[in-house]
Image (spheres, rainbow, N blue to C red):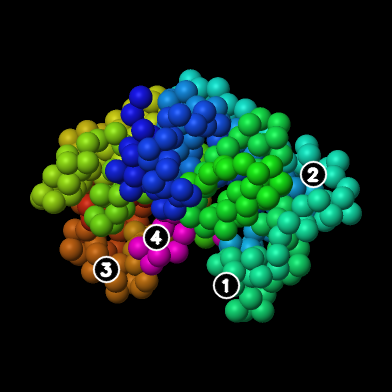
Amino acid sequence: MDNIIKKLNKRDLIFQITKKEYLLKNFNNLNINLYCGFDPTCDSLHIGHLLLIKYIIFFLKKKYNVIIVIGSSTSLIGDPSFKKNINFINNKYLIKKWAYSIKNQIYKLINLEKKKILILDNKKWFNSINLVDFLNNIGNKFKINYLLNKQSIKNRLKNNNLSFREFSYSIIQSYDFLYLYDKYKINLQIGGSDQWGNITSGIQLIKKIRKKNVYGITFPILTKLNGHKFSKSDSNNIWLDKTKTSSYNFYQFFININDKEVKNYLKYFTNIKIEDIHNICNSNKKNIIAGKKIIANELTKMVHGKTELNIINKITDKIFNTNNLLTEDDLNYLYINNFNLIILNNYIKLRDFLIKCNISKSNTESNILINQGSIKINGKINNNIKYIFSKNDILFNKYTFIKKGKKNFYLIKWLTII
């Protein structure tokens, strides 16, 4: 069997790793069982979690035992590795609800690959722990200076914005690793690079208490061009739940990623050979666009399934090909998926519609767009600056499809037709 660490390393999928040289030589002989965690601080995973899901599927395909831990207890504490304490939710009912949603979401993502996985909730063991016993048996294994040297702790202390609750997070999460080591023989934890401090705390705890070596691997965090990671607090976040981000908008996000991101995304999310990826990214614009489509197809299939992907590809082809008209089923699909949807009750001027949709900021700008022939109504250019929508613009008694330029599309749903 090929060494998995070498494969991951070749695709730049390893950001940090303990005992790298040793694992490069011996990984296949270590009887590895691994785990990763998800704190339920929201009701859905987002694209920032995709690489961890991909990692899990990768190991499952190689026949490794994988356990996922839903951190209902740790989410009540709040992970200080977050720049803001946005993930602290002091509501057990919400966390229970979100934990259920995320657990089902993970099962769905894994089941698409027809793999089985064990998902546990750390409240199972934390609910029965005595605080004094925990501090005596676990807390005394951690020195304050060791914790203060954690980068996540340093960053928060700079802003005088760290509670004891958050300060204890690394200790509490490290106990997850110890518990899983004892009960399930887990000897590897994986996670994003922001979890390195928490992972190494667990490794140190097991070393001190059980006198055994265990390991940790982190992967690169997906970031935006500004270097910030994707977060549930972002108003324009891309969610894995289609009720929060439609499958079409999910697909389009990856179609429209920056050219500079294509190379890494191809390495992270596809099985394309590295030399072929270099050829794609070092060639012409047409190949870069093809690379984006490969990424969008791969991830949409992974998250939403092949049937949904086929529908999206069919509709996308029609939208960008003026010779193919959208059917009623196509428009119904876009409506259900909240495709740049505008609800209108009365016929309004075209230029007012452009302002209402934030396509333009003023009548003057609207007039320029219309005069230039940049606006199409149901596939036909309209350059009448005084134009008012009418019944003739309504398809199937309910829709109007608007196109601005080459890439911007909007769907009007009419509530009243006179």
* Mark 3 touches mark 2? (CB < 8 Å): no
Q: Position of residue 302 (x, y in %)?
A: 42, 32
Identify the residue position indicated by label 2 in the image: 126
Q: Is residue 341 visible?
A: no
The amino acid sitting under disc 2 is Phe
The amino acid sitting under disc 1 is Asn
* Mark 1 touches mark 3? (CB < 8 Å): no
Task: Please give the range of residues in magenta.
Answer: 221-233
Judge depth for marks 3 and 2 and give the one in front.
Answer: 2
Foreground residue among 20 and 380 = 20
Query: What element does badge 3 sit on?
Result: helix
Identify the residue position indicated by label 4 in the image: 224
| Residue at point 67%, 36% (across, down) | 180
Query: What element does badge 1 sit on?
Result: helix
Distance from disc 2 to disc 1, alpha carbons, whole Å, reads 28 Å
Q: Position of residue 173 (x, y in %)?
A: 68, 50
Q: Tag on residue 53?
A: none
Q: Quadrant of residue 391?
A: top left
Identify the residue position indicated by label 3 in the image: 367
